[in-house]
Image: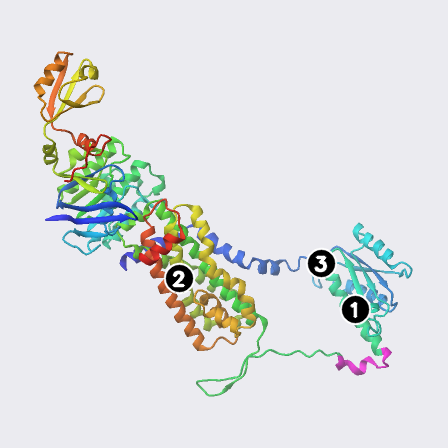
């Protein structure tokens, strides 16, 4: 069963089409990643799922309910911009958010999550005294404290240091292991690749990718070479069958044309310089993202 | 409703548990009634420096009477009888011979003495003061001082001068003053309410004597209290919604609560805060009034109306404030919207005086039946001794209820759309469009 299902959803703001004829299915218990450039319609889609914004057209079903907002209490949402009552105390704030959703006391859950995310010592402190990372963890707890069936997170890792990002990532995966459906948006393609069962990409309001990482990568084929050489990009100029060279400093990435032979490319490079590593791989999500949304994007595909 | 009440609880606690609320609770009545309190407290703080008066008595029959009256006053009135402390200035009177040749020159010289501080003022009594009908210009009395319009000495002079004139005129008419004492008795007219019938016993109820406190002060204080309650809560709602929008708290809450529930939570919390404040003021006021022995002036019959109107006024204006707060992304936007929101509370403050003087006039009736003004002006009229006809109270109430429902409905539509729009200044066209289309 799908936790979230959108059918031909369109949302406009004045003359701007934010989301156009969007359909997608988020399977229950999955981690579903929303990617897309800024202003592509990710947040609008998440807000429509949360019934914060109403679609102009189309149907949204959440946990089997198509009535708008019918199961609001079974979902939880963490917006991209964090919003916390600064003058409330940490535990008091969590209890407020939990009680607002569930209608029952959530002291036990609050203490559990505070301990889980290392904020127990701050339980009686005012929110305004917390650092940015702590505030973000607190916002995450406020989102999940009501034990929702679907958790929607808009950029949950934005601005977090690696340690705190890992703490949040572990918490998300733990929730998934308990059967919770996670939908989150991110600009971090590495996170999306590693964490998401399904990846959905929206560009200019239209769906351009949707599926498992493998299925997405398979669409693009094995057209990428990652290599390390002594001379870097200097040895990669004017290679036959290579349509793009991306320099990452110590490593370069080459994109082959459809009829290109990787062996011929390897031979050509070896004739110019010493090769330390040479891998023929599927394009990364980052690369696919850039191909669709970058300045070189030729045409927006429909997924 | 559960969520709304949970939000109300948070908002209420956040509002009343602050030092600002406690300080505001004390300061608001001081600001509102500060003038009256200061007047009461400082009314005896008068300048006790002795004052010298020069009298140019061109009639030759009044000056000495003023000298005598000033001496009696200095002897009996300027010291506190019990403490012996000086509480008023002594008046010394200097009789100056009139200069019949150059009157204006004499006046200039005396004016210069006032300027130099040798005199407080000088009095010029016309030669024909005893019989003003013969030549009104010769019967003038002029008081010259730096600030003659607001001068205690000028007010005091009225009594000894007129008393002396009365005696002189009686003597001229050949009448013995002791035989016509009643001639000078001033008849007062008692203000009374209307006689009524006791519903239970059928007995005729005597009319109550009215006075200015009951007729003017009680209604004004009641309306002022309403104004204070509105001012305590409504501007706060505008800022609170704007803050929660700009700090993105609103979006977090909208993940748990519908926009209308969110707005109602704000409104009901505002009402709860005002109920708390009004309870403090009413209980405090009741204790003070009872202690002062004026318990009979408390308009008990109006109190239920006060709470009903307060509930509706805050709901009505609070809905507008919340909706417009949701359209603001910056403090200056909220600042510029504050005045239009408070117009329904401010206009009654500008118009209450003619209404309280003539509460049954058609101006008073129609103004108080205009729903945004009803909570203030109908309450004002209801608190006057005669009250208002029952139909007006009911019509006013129905009008306010209808307006409140409409304001809450429209406010809810604007609130829902505007709350998530960041960086869009509140334009009238947008607000109207959101109100119409949602």
Most common secondary structure along the magenta stretch: helix
Cα–Cα gap, marks 2 and 1: 59 Å
* Magenta range: B171-183
- Residue A172 is labelled as none
Q: Are marks 2 and 1 in contact (CB under 8 Å)?
A: no
The chain carrying label 1 is: B
Label 2, on which residue?
B316
Front-most of residues A141 and B398? B398
Give the residue displayed 14% in from the left and 48% down from the top. A3
Cα–Cα gap, marks 2 and 3: 56 Å
Q: Earlier in the sequence, mark 2 or mark 1?
A: 1
The chain carrying label 2 is: B
Label 1, on which residue?
B160
Viewer-nearest of discs 2 and 3: 2
- Residue B85 is labelled as 3
Q: Split into 4 quadrants, where in the image is the C terminus of chain B?
A: bottom left
Secondary structure at numbered mark 3: loop
The chain carrying label 3 is: B
Which x, y percent locates residue A162?
24, 31
Q: Earlier in the sequence, mark 1 or mark 3?
A: 3
Secondary structure at numbered mark 1: helix
The quarter of the displayed image where residue A259 is located: top left
Front-most of residues A271 and B68? A271
Is B379 above or below relative to A61?
below
Is A21 above or below relative to B2?
above
Residue B174 visible in the current orientation: yes
Badge 2: how crowded within 10 Å, few (<14), some, or many (20+)? Answer: many
Q: Earlier in the sequence, mark 2 or mark 3?
A: 3
Secondary structure at numbered mark 2: helix
Which x, y percent locates residue B375?
45, 66
């Amino acid at each position: 069963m799908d936790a979230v299902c959108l059918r031909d959803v369109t949302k406009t703001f004045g003359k701007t089409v934010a989301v156009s004829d969007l359909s997608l299915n988020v399977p229950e218990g999955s981690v579903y990643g929303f990617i897309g450039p800024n202003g592509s319609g990710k947040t609008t889609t998440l807000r429509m799922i949360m019934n914060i914004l109403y679609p102009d057209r189309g149907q949204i079903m959440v946990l089997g309910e198509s009535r708008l907002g019918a199961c609001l209490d079974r979902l939880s949402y963490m917006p991209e911009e964090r919003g916390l009552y600064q003058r409330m105390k940490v535990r008091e704030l969590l209890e407020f958010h939990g009680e607002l959703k569930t209608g029952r006391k959530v002291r036990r859950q609050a203490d559990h999550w505070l301990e889980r995310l290392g904020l127990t010592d701050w339980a009686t402190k005012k929110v305004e005294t917390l650092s940015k990372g702590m505030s973000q963890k607190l916002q995450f707890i406020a989102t999940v404290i009501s034990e929702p069936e679907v958790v929607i997170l808009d950029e949950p890792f934005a601005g977090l240091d690696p340690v705190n990002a890992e703490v949040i990532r572990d918490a998300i995966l733990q929730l998934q292991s308990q059967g919770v459906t996670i939908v989150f948006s991110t600009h971090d393609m590495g996170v999306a690749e590693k964490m998401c069962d399904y990846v959905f990409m929206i560009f200019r309001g239209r769906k351009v990718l949707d599926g498992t990482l493998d299925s997405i990568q398979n669409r693009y084929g094995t057209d990428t070479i990652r290599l390390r050489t002594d001379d870097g990009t200097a040895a990669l100029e004017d290679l036959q069958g290579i349509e793009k060279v991306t320099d990452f400093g110590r490593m370069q990435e080459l994109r082959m044309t459809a009829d290109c032979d990787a062996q011929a490319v390897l031979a050509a490079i070896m004739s110019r310089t010493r090769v330390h590593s040479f891998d023929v791989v599927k394009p990364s999500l980052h690369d696919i993202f850039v191909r669709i949304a970058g300045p070189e994007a030729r045409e927006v595909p429909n997924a | 409703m559960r969520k709304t009440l949970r939000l109300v609880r948070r908002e209420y606690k956040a509002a009343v548990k602050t030092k600002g609320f406690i300080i505001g609770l004390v300061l608001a009545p001081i600001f509102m009634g500060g003038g009256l309190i200061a007047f009461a407290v400082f009314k005896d703080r008068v300048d006790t420096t002795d004052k010298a008066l020069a009298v140019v008595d061109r009639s030759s029959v009044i000056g000495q009477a003023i000298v005598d009256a000033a001496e009696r006053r200095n002897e009996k009135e300027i010291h506190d009888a019990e403490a012996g402390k000086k509480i008023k200035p002594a008046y010394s009177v200097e009789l100056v011979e009139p200069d019949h040749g150059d009157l204006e020159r004499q006046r200039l010289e005396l004016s210069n003495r006032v300027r130099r501080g040798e005199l407080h003022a000088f009095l010029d009594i016309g030669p024909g003061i005893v019989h003003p009908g013969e030549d009104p210009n010769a019967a003038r009395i002029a008081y010259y001082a730096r600030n003659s319009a607001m001068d205690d000495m000028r007010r005091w002079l009225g009594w000894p001068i007129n008393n002396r004139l009365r005696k002189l005129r009686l003597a001229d008419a050949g009448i013995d003053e002791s035989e016509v004492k009643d001639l000078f008795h001033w008849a007062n007219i008692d203000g009374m309410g209307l006689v009524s019938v006791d519903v239970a016993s059928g007995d005729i109820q005597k009319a109550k004597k009215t006075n200015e406190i009951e007729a003017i002060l009680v209604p004004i204080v009641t309306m002022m209290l309403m104004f204070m309650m509105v001012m305590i809560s409504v501007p706060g709602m505008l800022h609170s919604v704007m803050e929660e929008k700009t700090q993105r708290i609103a979006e977090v809450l909208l993940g748990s609560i519908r926009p209308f529930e969110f707005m109602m939570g704000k409104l009901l919390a505002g009402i709860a805060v005002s109920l708390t404040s009004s309870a403090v003021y009413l209980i405090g006021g009741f204790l003070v009034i009872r202690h002062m022995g004026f318990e009979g002036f408390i308009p008990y019959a109006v109190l239920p109306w006060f709470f009903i109107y307060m509930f509706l006024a805050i709901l009505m204006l609070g809905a507008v404030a919340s909706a417009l707060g949701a359209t603001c992304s910056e403090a200056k936007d909220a600042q510029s919207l504050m005045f239009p929101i408070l117009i329904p509370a401010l206009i009654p403050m500008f118009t209450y005086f003619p209404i309280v003087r003539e509460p049954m006039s058609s101006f008073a009736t129609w103004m108080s039946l205009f729903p945004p003004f009803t909570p203030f002006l109908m309450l004002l009229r209801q608190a006057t001794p005669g009250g208002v006809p029952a139909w007006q109270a009911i019509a006013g109430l129905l009008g306010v209820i209808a307006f409140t429902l409409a304001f809450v409905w429209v406010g809810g539509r604007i609130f829902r759309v505007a709350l998530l729009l960041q960086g869009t200044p509140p334009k009238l066209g947008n607000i109207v469009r959101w109100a119409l289309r949602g």
